[in-house]
Image (cartoon, rainbow, N blue to C red):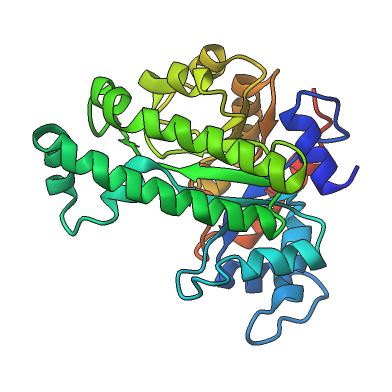
């Protein structure tokens, strides 16, 4: 199977030849270290060919791209280049309503306070943010994205930043509207509905049913502050889970932690990856390769 076929088949609950793997990004320092362990020379600076080789060493199937805010007319140039020159499954990352508005505040606490004391203001800001995300989403689909990942960091280790009630009253109606609009846009531009995932750090167990009812195809991050077996039970086998492997596990847990994770998320649709989504340059390349090569050798159950 190709990488794109493998990821799509897993998302759709179909048979795959092996477990797909995906990350947002691998930092340059780790890319260079990975290449030093292979016969591929590491050119300064690291170009697309070098990065692609490092991703192949890890056996990655899916990658995530952010819009380039410095190029408003062509925000997805890098995604389009990878779409033209590689066979990776490419997610385009868009802001969700909570994150899209929250990033506009210099003081995050002031933002949280406004969700209670000035909901009319927040609603207007959400509308503006979601229009921007929809426009970026349209451009991403036109540039060749295979999937969409809506990033909305609504939680931390102890739960949601605001109550589920306020999330449902102020933010989720717009999140659902964005989801539906992106589906219509993908049918129009790509001839099919692209899979749309939801990303948030932290403990999001209180709103898992909301995400399921909105018909997201998947959820990314899956930090270990949550019981992932509980997450799987809540969303069912059809929703694709992505991530879940803690960065500290590469050296502190290794392969046994992979087995532990898979026992919680399988059977069901799943893409292996780190919960952080970014493999940082301080990780041991040997430890990272050991984990990814182990996963690459697994047959999907």
Q: Is residue 227 left or right of residue 203?
A: right
In the drawing, does residue 89 fall left or right of residue 156?
right
Between 46 and 247, the residue placed more toward the observer is 46
- Tell which residue pokes out farthest to the bottom in this image: 44
Instruction: Give residue 263's position: percent from left, percent from top.
Output: 64, 21
Q: Is residue 223 visible?
A: no
Residue 34 % position (x, y): 69, 67
Task: Report if residue 299 is visible in the image.
Answer: yes
* Residue 203 higher or lower than 92, as above or below: above
Q: Residue at x 41, y 39 (%)?
A: 201
At a point 17% along the width and 35% down the height, the residue shown is 119
In the foreground, 144 or 268: 144
Residue at image position (84%, 41%) is 5
Name, please, the residue furthest toward the right. Answer: 1
Which residue does the image show at 13% across and 32% down from the upper left?
116
Q: Which corner quadrant holds the N terminus?
A: top right
């Amino acid at each position: 199977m190709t990488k794109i076929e493998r990821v799509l088949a897993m998302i759709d609950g179909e048979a795959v030849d092996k477990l797909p793997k995906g990350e947002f990004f691998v930092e340059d320092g780790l890319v260079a270290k990975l290449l030093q362990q292979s016969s591929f020379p590491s050119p300064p600076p690291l170009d697309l060919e070098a990065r692609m080789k490092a991703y192949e060493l890890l056996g990655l199937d899916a990658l995530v791209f952010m819009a380039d805010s410095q190029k408003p007319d062509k925000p997805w140039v890098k995604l389009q280049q990878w779409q033209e020159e590689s066979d990776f499954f490419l997610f385009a990352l868009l802001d969700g309503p909570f994150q899209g508005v929250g990033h506009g505040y210099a003081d995050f606490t002031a933002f949280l306070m406004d969700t209670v004391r000035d909901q009319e203001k927040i609603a207007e800001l959400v509308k503006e943010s979601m229009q921007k995300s929809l426009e970026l989403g349209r451009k991403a689909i036109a540039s060749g994205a295979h999937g969409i990942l809506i990033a909305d960091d609504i939680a931390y280790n102890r739960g949601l930043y605001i109550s589920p009630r306020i999330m449902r009253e102020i933010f989720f109606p717009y999140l659902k509207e964005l989801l539906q609009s992106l589906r219509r846009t993908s049918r129009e531009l790509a001839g099919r509905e692209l899979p749309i995932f939801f990303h948030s750090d932290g403990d999001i167990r209180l709103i898992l049913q909301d995400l399921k009812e909105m018909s997201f195809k998947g959820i990314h991050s899956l930090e270990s502050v949550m019981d992932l077996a509980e997450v799987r039970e809540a969303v069912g086998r059809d929703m694709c889970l992505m991530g879940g492997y803690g960065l500290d596990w590469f050296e502190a847990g290794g392969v046994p932690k992979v087995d532990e994770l898979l026992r919680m998320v399988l059977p069901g649709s799943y893409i292996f990856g780190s919960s952080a989504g970014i493999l940082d340059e301080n990780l041991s390349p040997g430890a990272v390769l050991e984990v990814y090569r182990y996963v690459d050798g697994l047959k999907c159950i």
